[in-house]
Image (cartoon, rainbow, N blue to C red):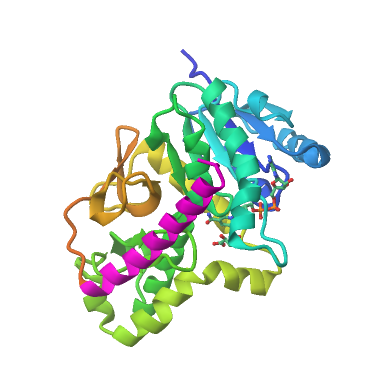
């Protein structure tokens, strides 16, 4: 029997990440080459026409797996029956905006989207938040979807993970596939901590292979953590194709499992592991088994790493306090 299509909702579909993402979903890269998809695009009314243009282009690709495209400016309709929700559309920080203002503006987007997911999404719904501040936006959406298992709400740090892989591979002159078990901890922000102490490079420890503390501290960590800002500076716009690529990687691995002998990074609700307060949506080393993310347990965290993980987690706690005070969670 032919497989039923999977409904994938993409918010901010007419934006630049949307444009880089939709064609890859429709071609089968999000879920697998045998899985048909139906796209449900959510935009704000002024951007619906642009989304319609993208849908015309999707039609013009004649993707065999694409079984339909619907466009909405109403969240309840967009999430009705959806299996995978990619929450990309968000309110960008504008000049003079404080962090609290940004969180409040995004609360106006992610609260109703959480409610809409709660009201009508399919039982197996999986949510990936890409729109910034991604971790706390995910927390807001999750708080308004009490009937959906909390662990179905995740935020994207896979782009940071991929950035770290390339920086380390270039430093060591090895290929990406030679590196395993790298980790991004904490927030998708400049406080994130890319950790190579548990990484393996062709079987040896990543930190030992590098053997250069100054590079690790003053080059690798800040380069990865501030890469988003560096892209904005260079391109005049934030990362789009690489962000879309990371979203594809995150969902593909979540649904299909991570390879044996490796792990990846994703921001998922903390169960208290590694001293991260329960409930915070923080990046961890994770594997995906049977369709669920699991935090890799038992890693030893030295003082160098502890300080950096704690700083990023502290920022997440402060963001949570702010949205609590604003009544958003
Ligand atoms: P963009 O401005 O090009 O597109 C955003 C789109 O979202 C716009 O078309 C806008 O109309 C739409 N939108 C706004 N409010 C909406 C709502 N309530 N419902 C539906 N759609 C809505 O931005 P972009 O470059 O595509 O980036 C999107 C977000 O992703 C930004 O917040 C950006 O900071 C973030 N981002 C995250 C990562 C990450 O690694 N987590 C990486 C890159 C970018
Ligand atoms: C990125 O990491 O590229 C983005 O989150 C940067 C941004 O602020 O949109």
Q: Residue at x 41, y 60 (%)?
A: 161
Whether 322 is among the magenta residues is: yes
In front of the other: 82 or 76: 76
Instruction: State left or right for residue 253 relative to residue 63.
Output: left
Most distant residue in the top direction: 1
163 and 146: which one is in front? 146
Measured as percent of width and height from the top left, residue 251 is found at: 46, 41
Magenta range is: 303-329
Task: List x then y, in percent, for residue 264.
Answer: 34, 53
Q: Main secondary structure of the magenta part?
A: helix
Asked if residue 211 can be seen in this view, the reply is yes
Query: What residue lies at 46% left-to-right and 52% top-to-bottom?
Result: 321
Q: Is residue 63 above or below residue 270?
A: above
The image quadrant of residue 192 is bottom left
Q: Residue 81: which quarter of the image?
A: top right
Q: Position of residue 207 (x, y in %)?
A: 25, 75
Q: Quadrant of residue 158?
A: bottom left
């Amino acid at each position: 029997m032919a497989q039923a299509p999977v409904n994938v909702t993409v918010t901010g579909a007419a934006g630049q990440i949307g444009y880089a993402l939709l064609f890859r979903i429709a071609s089968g890269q999000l879920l697998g080459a045998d899985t048909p998809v139906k796209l449900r695009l959510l935009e704000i009314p002024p951007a619906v026409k642009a989304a319609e243009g993208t849908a015309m282009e999707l039609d013009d690709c004649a993707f065999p797996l694409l079984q339909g495209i619907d466009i909405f400016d109403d969240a309840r309709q967009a999430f009705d029956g959806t299996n995978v929700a990619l929450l990309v559309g968000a309110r960008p920080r504008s000049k003079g905006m404080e962090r609290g203002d940004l969180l409040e503006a995004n609360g106006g987007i992610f609260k109703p989207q959480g409610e809409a997911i709660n009201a009508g999404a399919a039982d197996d719904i999986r949510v990936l938040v890409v729109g910034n501040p991604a971790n706390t936006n995910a927390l807001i959406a999750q708080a308004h979807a009490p009937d959906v298992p909390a662990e179905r709400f995740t935020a994207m740090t896979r782009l940071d993970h991929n950035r770290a892989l390339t920086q380390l591979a270039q430093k060591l002159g090895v290929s990406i596939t030679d590196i395993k078990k790298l980790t991004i901890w904490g927030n998708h922000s400049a406080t994130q901590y890319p950790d190579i102490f548990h990484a393996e490079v062709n079987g040896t420890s990543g930190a030992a292979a590098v053997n250069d503390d100054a590079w690790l501290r003053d080059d690798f960590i800040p380069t990865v953590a501030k890469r988003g800002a560096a892209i904005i500076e260079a391109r005049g716009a934030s990362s789009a194709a690489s962000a879309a690529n990371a979203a594809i990687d995150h969902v593909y691995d979540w649904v299909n499992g991570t390879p044996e002998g490796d792990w990846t990074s994703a921001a998922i609700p903390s169960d208290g592991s590694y001293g991260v307060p329960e409930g915070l949506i923080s990046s961890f080393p994770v594997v995906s088994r049977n369709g669920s993310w699991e935090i890799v347990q038992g890693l030893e965290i030295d003082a160098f790493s502890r300080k950096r993980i704690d700083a990023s987690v502290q920022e997440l706690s402060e963001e949570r306090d702010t949205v609590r005070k604003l009544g958003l969670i």
